[in-house]
């Protein structure tokens, strides 16, 4: 099947397209386009076509190739700006989870994309692997369109997860996969399915705690039904869940888009007798996160702001680290403080050395590599964790 970019190339006058390529090559080589490698010329041409295709998707009206490119490039830059805003919103409320791939991709990986992305000369490039999988699957797109779609989905998934206590999500996910913390698995799908299952079983979804009798009831409810019939059942439960959790329109719409896939998986799981794997019960209590610190209980905004101001007024050193341990009870708050309170590299090293083994291991899982780490505090934290 012919790609959209290939159709765009075929629709443009070849002379105008190659004139545009020559201009971009001269800009890239600073006037020495004759020395451009063939592979780079092909990449520049693909970038030009990607940018023009952006313009034609937004406005299919015809125009000279140079105008199409100029307007497409302006559109690409606006998309980058909007995606930066979306990324900032997500990071401000990033769901605290020990899953390695969640934070590393959504915060660090996407930040790495913005650092490397060049819409003028390599608009089609993604640069990052985006290892954290979305419920809707990997976007079949390139460049900023990939990131735009990825962030659109990630924002909805992150918002939904944030409706539940992190320790409840952790226990539920351990029931699905004991080593989920170091596995690239989607966190949103099982949380949504368990919440919908609880609604259908007539129980509150707040704690994400399915019981054996609930799973048995779901088996009876779904048994013998087609995927479409199951989708309608899930859609009715989602309407009630939307009201109960006060889901914003974007999150609710995303969840609805996922229902056909989840209904097909549910129908298959009923046939195979594996519904408890798709709708997991919580893991055992002894595997839970250490309750003294990694419990997800974040400070409210006012308390957090007071702590940042207090730390700013203190002299650097051990006293500030001690004050953090006295006040902070969440790894998510701790990671935010590293930036907001301008914790020094020496203080970060002292803080890491003082952490209990469980919390230290959790952080190591979240920072297994320094790839795409751009903030000085995160780089310092990674180094301290290697000691």
Image (cartoon, rainbow, N blue to C red):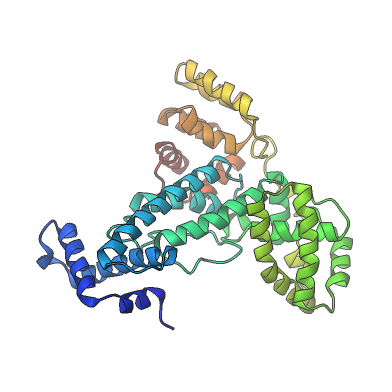
> For residue 304, which quarter of the picture?
top right
* Residue 130 x %, y %: 47, 59
Residue 187 x/y as whole percent: 64, 57
Rendering quarter of residue 92: top right
Image position, residue 355 (x, y; %) = 56, 34
Foreground residue, 256 or 371?
Answer: 256
State the count of labels.
0
Whether residue 163 sits left or right of residue 358 in the image: it is: right
On the rendered image, what quadrant is the N terminus found in? bottom left
Residue 382 makes an appearance in the image: yes
Q: What is the residue that sits farthest to the bottom in this orientation? A: 1
Residue in view at x 25 percent, y 63 percent? 66
User: Horizontal placement of 124 versus 322: left or right?
Assistant: left
Q: Nearer the viewer, residue 342 or 91?
A: 91
**Can you see residue 284?**
no
Residue plotted at (52% across, 54% down): 151
Query: Looking at the figure, which quarter contains the C terminus?
Result: top left
Q: Which residue shows up at 76% across the image and 72% down it?
A: 274
Name the spot of residue 193 as percent of width and height, x first: 74, 61
Q: Quadrant of residue 227?
A: bottom right
Q: Residue at x 67, y 59 (%)?
A: 255
**Of 26 and 12, the residue lying toward us:** 12
* Position of residue 279 in the picture relative to residue 83 (left or right): right
């Amino acid at each position: 099947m012919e790609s959209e970019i290939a159709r765009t190339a075929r629709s443009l006058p070849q002379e105008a397209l190659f004139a545009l390529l020559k201009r971009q090559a001269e800009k890239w080589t600073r006037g020495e386009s004759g020395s451009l490698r063939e592979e780079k010329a092909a990449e520049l041409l693909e970038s030009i076509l990607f940018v023009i295709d952006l313009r034609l998707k937004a406005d299919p009206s015809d125009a000279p190739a140079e105008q199409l490119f100029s307007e497409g490039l302006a559109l690409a830059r606006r998309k980058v700006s909007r995606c930066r805003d979306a990324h900032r919103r997500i990071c401000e409320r990033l769901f605290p989870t020990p899953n390695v791939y969640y934070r590393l991709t959504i915060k660090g990986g996407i930040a790495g994309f913005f650092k490397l992305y060049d819409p003028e000369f390599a608009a089609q490039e993604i640069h990052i692997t985006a290892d954290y999988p979305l419920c809707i699957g990997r976007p079949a797109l390139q460049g900023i369109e990939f990131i735009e779609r990825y962030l659109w989905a990630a924002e909805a998934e992150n918002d939904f997860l944030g409706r539940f206590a992190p320790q409840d999500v952790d226990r539920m996910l351990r029931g699905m996969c004991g080593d989920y913390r170091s596995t690239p698995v989607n966190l949103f799908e099982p949380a949504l399915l368990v919440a919908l299952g609880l609604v259908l079983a007539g129980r509150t979804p707040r704690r994400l705690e399915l019981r054996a009798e609930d799973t048995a009831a779901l088996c009876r409810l779904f048994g013998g039904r087609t995927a479409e019939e199951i989708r309608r059942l899930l859609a009715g439960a989602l309407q009630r869940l939307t009201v109960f959790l006060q889901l914003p329109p974007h999150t609710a719409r995303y969840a609805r888009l996922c229902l056909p896939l989840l209904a097909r998986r549910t129908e298959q799981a009923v046939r195979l007798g594996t519904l408890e794997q798709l709708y997991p019960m919580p893991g055992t209590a002894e595997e839970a996160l250490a309750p003294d610190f990694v419990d997800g209980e974040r400070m409210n905004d006012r308390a957090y702001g007071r702590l940042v101001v207090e730390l700013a007024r203190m002299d650097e050193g051990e006293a500030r680290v001690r004050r953090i341990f006295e006040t902070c009870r969440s790894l998510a708050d701790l990671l935010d403080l590293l930036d907001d309170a301008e914790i020094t590299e020496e203080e970060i090293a002292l803080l890491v050395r003082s952490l209990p083994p469980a919390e230290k291991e959790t952080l190591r899982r979240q920072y297994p590599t320094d790839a795409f780490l751009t903030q000085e505090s995160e780089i310092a934290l990674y180094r301290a964790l290697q000691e």
